Image (tube, helix red, strand yellow):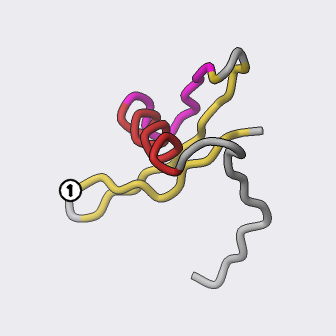
């Protein structure tokens, strides 16, 4: 809608499949909230935002909160 996203982030060294799985779990467990996970001894919050359209929930965005 004409907005520019000021920053973006990704995990370095993870497979795309694992990253997608983490985002999926985060949105299923804690939609519109931070989901804390532990990877390699580090604690990371994964933020996600969902929106509803015609009664269905959709993932708007998910990203590691650094």
Residue occupying the point 63% across, 23% down:
39
Residue that extends furthest to the top in the rendered view of this protein:
41
Q: In which quarter of the image is the N terminus?
A: bottom right
Q: In which quarter of the image is the C terminus?
A: top right
Circle 1 Cα neighbour tier, 10 Å, few/some/many (<14 / 14–19 / ≥20): few
Task: Give the image location of residue 53, x and y in percent.
Answer: 28, 63
The verdict on residue 44 being magenta is no
Q: Which residue position holds label 1? A: 55
Residue occupying the point 71% across, 68% down:
5
Q: Quadrant of residue 14?
A: top right
Task: Give the image location of residue 8, x and y in percent.
Answer: 73, 59
Q: In which quarter of the image is residue 54?
A: bottom left
Please state the extent of the stretch shown in magenta in the rendering. 29-38
Question: Closer to the camera, 63 or 40?
Answer: 40
Residue that extends furthest to the bottom in the rendered view of this protein:
2
Question: Closer to the camera, 16 or 43?
Answer: 16
């Amino acid at each position: 809608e004409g907005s520019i996203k000021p920053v973006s982030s990704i995990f370095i060294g993870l497979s795309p499949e694992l990253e997608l799985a983490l985002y999926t779990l985060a949105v299923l467990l804690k939609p519109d909230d931070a989901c804390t996970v532990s990877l390699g001894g580090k604690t990371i919050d994964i933020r996600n935002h969902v929106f509803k359209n015609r009664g269905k929930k959709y993932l708007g965005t998910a990203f590691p909160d650094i």
